[in-house]
Image (cartoon, helix red, strand yellow):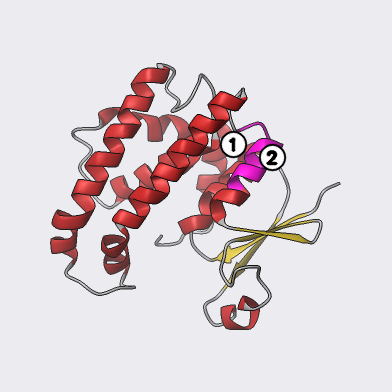
Amino acid sequence: MVAYKFTYFNGRGAGEVVRQILAYAGQEYEDNRVTMEEWPALKDGTPFGQLPLLEVDGKPLAQSHAIARYLAREFKLNGKCPWEEAQVNALADQFKDYSSEAKSYFYAKMGFGPGDVETLKKDVFLPAFEKFYTFLSKALKKSGSGFLIGDGLTWIDLAIAQHSADLLAQGADFGKFPDLKDHSEKIQSIPQIKKWIDTRPVTPF
């Protein structure tokens, strides 16, 4: 039996999609949550000096999307053919672009970075949000299935649904994107995912 150990901080962040893939698959794993105080002693032992980190039978794999793609392929959440897998990866890469564009707003809102939150929301977050969620809305309309790619669940559905849920919990206006609100509710109502959400540690982000 393969042994999985997933190391990340005690929050959702870049680690949540990995945990949800494992939850959906019903795969047992060690959910190793480290504190900021513990992290400096562990940093040099990671491939790139950062988290998250997945260990598969003791072999380390870094970078959140690389981990998600690996596990999605293992547990059939990467699309039903190479073309769908490529489309999933394209959306995931666009998600990273959006995250980079909006990074200063998210960091300021969480108290990790400088800047006026309301100014950054207006000048940074909202333009990035509207651009990215327009892409997502087009993907949903194209698939016609309620999933972003193809006619079944993929890991990018999990990632986007969680991000949407986090934004909605913070009071984000989804008036232009009711389809993405519905998507989030649909994905997070999947029994394995709902069970994980209902039982996971409560964290602010």
Local secondary structure at mark 1:
helix
The numbered dot on residue 192 is 1
Q: Residue furthest right?
A: 1
Image x and y of residue 70, in percent: 66, 44
How far apart marks 2 and 1 lie (CA) works out to: 8 Å
Q: Residue at x 81, y 56 (%)?
A: 57
Q: Is residue 71 one of those drawn in magenta?
A: yes
Question: 36 left or right of 91?
Answer: right
Q: Is residue 82 above or below residue 205?
A: above
Q: Residue at x 30, y 73 (%)?
A: 113
Task: Verify CB contact (< 8 Å) between mark 2 and mark 1.
Answer: yes
- The stretch in magenta equals 68-77
Q: Main secondary structure of the magenta part?
A: helix
Question: 37 left or right of 99?
Answer: right
| Viewer-closest of 5 and 86 | 86
| Label 1 crowd bin: few (<14), some (14–19), many (20+), radius 10 Å | some
Q: Is residue 35 one of those drawn in magenta?
A: no
Q: Residue at x 55, y 54 (%)?
A: 64
What's under tag 2, amino acid-wise? Gly
Residue annotated with mark 2: 26
